[in-house]
Image (cartoon, rainbow, N blue to C red):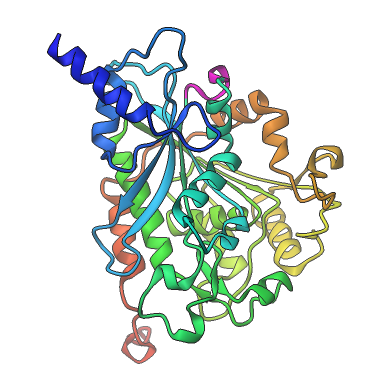
C-alpha cells in the first residue's frame, strides 16, 4: 500500500508538468533516465486517462567541460513489456535547422517544444497512435542554437555563429549554401554519441535495430552521425537532406559513402520540386550521385503534394512519414544488423572524436 501511494505521488508530480499544448508529453528534467524507466515499468496508468508516453529530459555529459548538457525528448513504448529479455528498436530523430532561431527567452522550453512538434515518434505518441510507434523507443536530442552554447572559450566573433548539428557557420552563409568558412563541431558530435551510448546502456534497446532518421539539416546530421559510428545504424533515413564538403574538417562525400557502405539500409527521400534544398545543389546532387554509384542507392522521390508544406517550398519531405506512418515504420523494421556493435563501441567513439588531432609531422612515413 505504501509503495502504491508513493507511485501515485510520483505520477501526480510528473503529470503536473505537461509540455505546453501537450497531454502525453511531460517535463521529467529532474528525473534520471534510470528512475524514469523504473517508474514506467511499475506505473499502470490511471483510469480514463492516457498513460504518459513522451518525456523531456536533460543529458549531462561526463566527458566535456564546454557542452556538458543536451536536452532531449524520449518516447517510451506502449505498452511496455516487462519481460527482462525483451528489447525494443530505437529511432533516433535529428531535427531540422528551425531551432537555430531559438536564442532568446526560455530557450530550453522552446527548443523542446519545437522538437516535440517535429519528431514523428513524439507526435504519434502524443496523438495516442500507439499501434504505429508503440513498439519503438524514440530519442530526439536538441541541437545547441549557437557556438556560445557550445563553448565559453569560443572566440567572440564566432559566439553568434549558428550550430547546424555537427558544423557551424554564420546564418547568411548557411542561407546561401556557402560552407567554405564552416567548421566541424566535435563537441556536439561527441555529446550526441555519448547520449546514444547512455540510452543504450540504461534502456532495453535492440542494438541490431537502431535507426537514424533526420529532416533537412537533420538529414545531413544522420549521414554525419552514421559515418562517425558506422557499426551502429541498421538504417539511415535522410528526408530532404544534404551533405556539405568542408575541406580540412572531415566532411567529404566520397569518404562518407565509403564509411557507411556496410549500413544495411540507406534511404534518402527528397522532392524534386524542393525550392529550399534543391536537388541540383552540389551538396545534394553529388551526395546522391555517389550513393547511386558506390552503393546502388537511389533517392525515393516524394510526391510534391505531400512535400509542398505550409510555405509551398516543397521542402517538407518529412510529411511522407506523417502521411504513411505504418508503411514507413514497417519499412524500418525490414532493416537490421547481423550483429550488434562491439562492447563499449560508442564510448570508444566518444574518446576518438574528442582526441586532439595528430599533427602531420607526427605521422610516421609509410614503410619503403
Residue 64 in the image: x percent, y percent? 28, 65
* Region in magenta: 129-135
**Residue sitting at x 58%, y 27%:** 124
Locate the C terminus and report the quarter of the image it occupies.
bottom left
Number of labelled discs?
A: 0
Based on the picture, tell me whether residue 59 belongs to the magenta stretch: no
Q: Compared with residue 94, is residue 326 higher up or lower down, i.e. above or below?
A: above
Q: Quadrant of residue 83?
A: top left
- Is 236 placed left or right of 52 in the picture? right
Q: In the displayed image of the protein, which residue is found farthest to the left?
A: 2
Residue 44 in the image: x percent, y percent? 33, 12
Q: Nearer the viewer, residue 90 or 231?
A: 90
**Residue sitting at x 58%, y 20%:** 129
Residue 56 in the image: x percent, y percent? 41, 40
Q: Can residue 121 be seen in this view?
A: yes
Locate the N terminus and report the quarter of the image it occupies.
top left
- Is 168 placed left or right of 83 in the picture? right
Q: Nearer the viewer, residue 103 or 74?
A: 103
Q: Which of 186 and 29 is in front in this view?
A: 29
Based on the picture, tell me whether residue 130 belongs to the magenta stretch: yes
Amino acid at each position: 500500500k505504501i509503495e502504491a501511494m508513493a507511485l501515485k505521488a510520483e505520477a501526480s508530480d510528473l503529470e503536473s508538468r505537461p509540455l505546453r499544448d501537450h497531454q502525453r508529453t511531460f517535463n521529467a528534467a529532474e528525473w534520471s533516465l534510470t528512475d524514469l524507466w523504473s517508474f514506467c515499468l511499475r506505473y499502470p496508468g490511471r483510469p480514463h486517462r492516457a498513460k504518459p508516453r513522451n518525456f523531456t529530459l536533460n543529458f549531462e555529459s561526463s566527458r566535456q567541460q564546454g557542452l556538458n548538457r543536451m536536452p532531449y525528448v524520449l518516447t517510451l513504448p506502449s505498452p511496455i513489456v516487462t519481460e527482462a529479455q525483451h528489447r525494443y528498436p530505437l529511432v533516433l530523430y535529428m531535427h531540422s535547422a528551425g531551432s537555430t532561431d531559438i536564442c532568446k527567452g526560455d530557450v530550453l522550453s522552446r527548443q523542446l517544444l519545437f522538437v516535440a512538434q517535429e519528431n514523428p515518434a513524439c507526435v504519434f505518441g502524443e496523438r495516442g497512435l500507439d499501434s504505429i510507434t508503440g513498439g519503438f523507443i524514440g530519442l530526439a536530442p536538441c541541437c545547441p542554437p549557437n557556438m556560445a552554447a557550445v563553448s565559453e572559450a569560443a572566440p567572440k566573433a564566432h559566439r553568434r555563429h549558428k550550430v547546424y548539428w555537427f558544423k557551424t557557420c554564420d546564418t547568411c552563409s548557411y542561407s546561401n549554401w556557402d560552407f567554405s568558412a564552416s567548421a566541424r563541431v566535435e563537441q556536439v558530435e561527441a555529446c550526441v554519441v555519448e547520449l546514444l551510448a547512455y540510452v543504450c546502456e540504461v534502456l532495453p534497446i535492440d542494438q541490431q535495430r537502431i535507426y537514424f532518421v533526420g529532416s533537412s539539416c537533420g538529414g545531413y546530421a544522420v549521414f554525419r552521425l552514421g559515418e562517425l559510428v558506422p557499426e551502429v545504424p541498421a538504417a539511415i533515413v535522410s528526408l530532404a537532406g544534404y551533405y556539405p564538403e568542408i575541406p580540412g574538417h572531415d566532411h567529404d562525400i566520397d569518404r562518407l559513402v565509403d564509411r557507411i557502405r556496410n549500413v544495411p539500409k540507406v534511404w534518402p527521400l527528397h522532392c524534386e520540386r524542393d525550392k529550399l534544398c534543391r536537388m541540383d545543389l552540389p551538396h545534394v546532387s553529388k551526395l546522391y550521385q555517389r550513393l547511386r554509384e558506390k552503393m546502388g542507392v537511389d533517392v525515393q522521390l516524394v510526391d510534391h503534394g505531400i512535400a509542398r508544406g505550409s510555405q509551398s517550398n516543397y521542402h517538407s519531405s518529412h510529411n511522407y512519414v506523417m502521411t504513411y506512418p505504418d508503411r514507413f515504420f514497417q519499412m524500418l523494421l525490414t532493416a537490421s544488423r547481423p550483429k550488434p556493435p562491439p562492447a563499449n563501441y560508442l564510448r570508444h567513439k566518444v574518446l576518438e572524436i574528442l582526441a586532439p588531432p595528430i599533427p602531420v609531422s607526427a605521422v610516421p612515413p609509410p614503410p619503403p
